[in-house]
Image: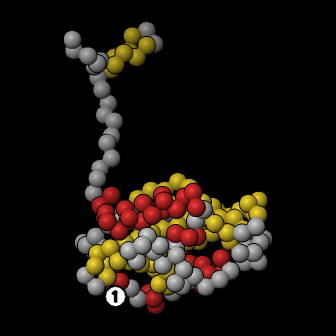
Amino acid sequence: MKHTSNLELFKYWNKLRGARLAPDRSEIDPGEIRKVLGDTFVFEADGHGNFPFRIAGTRLCALFGRELKGESFVNLWHQSGQTTVRELIAAVMEEKVGLVAKVTGTTANSSLLAVNLEMMLLPLAYNLRPDARVLGALAPMGAPYWLGAKAMGPLSLGTFRHIGPVIDQFVAPRLTAGATRQKHGLTVHIGGRTE
């Protein structure tokens, strides 16, 4: 995570969840995240794979030049990437892991005017339904001259990684030093096959 909005939102979500996999939707206090509210959103699982926005921040709506409440989160993406976005949302909801992704946005009528964004998706529980909501943020990494003057068109997904308690418990494998000896400037590593 690089954007300050995502860092602050993740810190708040992590504090709320405690030892649980995800905090409950009712625990979110907008006053606690007021500095990043403009970049945040909440969407819900509607059973049709559209994931309509329940709440969308003012800066996010300004990026797209319209109110996003009730609109499909998936429809913000290029049609070629919508299946991947649905699969990533399913992983966030089912596995209770967060996601941070690089995103590219262009204006609706010119792919030459592009901006790099960072997106974060975090699972929320709601009314005992563990897969009902996702809390997220989408913020530009820079401010090109046209941002705010022209509406953002379809988004493209870049690299992404999962974050959260389930991911944190796995220890990455490490290389260990093997037995070595040097002979005339050549390093010989002892090991290999024992046949």
Q: Amino acid at mark 1?
A: Ser
**For mark 1, what is the residue?**
26
Q: In the image, is residue 54 above or below residue 110?
A: below
- 177 left or right of 140 in image: left
In this orientation, does residue 79 appear? yes
Q: Label 1 neighbourhood size at 10 Å, few (<14), some (14-19), many (20+)? A: few
Q: Percent x, y for residue 69?
A: 54, 85
- 15 left or right of 158 in image: left
Taking the spot 37% from the left edge, 62% from the top edge, the residue there is 91
Q: Which sits in the foreground, 52 or 137?
A: 52
Kindly state the secondary structure of the residue where label 1 is placed. helix
Residue at the farthest bottom position: 31
Q: Which sits in the foreground, 32 or 163?
A: 163
Query: Quarter of the image holding residue 106?
Result: bottom right
Taking the spot 31% from the left edge, 82% from the top edge, the residue there is 126
Q: Percent x, y for residue 166?
A: 29, 61
- 146 left or right of 162 in image: right
Residue at the farthest top position: 184
Q: Which sits in the foreground, 145 or 172?
A: 145
Query: Quarter of the image holding residue 56?
Result: bottom right
Display coloring: secondary structure
Q: In the image, is residue 101 above or below residue 7?
A: above
In this orientation, does residue 142 appear? no
Q: In the image, is residue 118 above or below residue 67?
A: above
Give the tally of numbered discs: 1
Q: Percent x, y for residue 39?
A: 56, 78
The image quadrant where one finds the C terminus is: top left
Query: Quarter of the image holding residue 67?
Result: bottom right
Q: Percent x, y for residue 109?
A: 76, 67
Taking the spot 45% from the left edge, 78% from the top edge, the residue there is 43
Residue at the farthest front position: 48
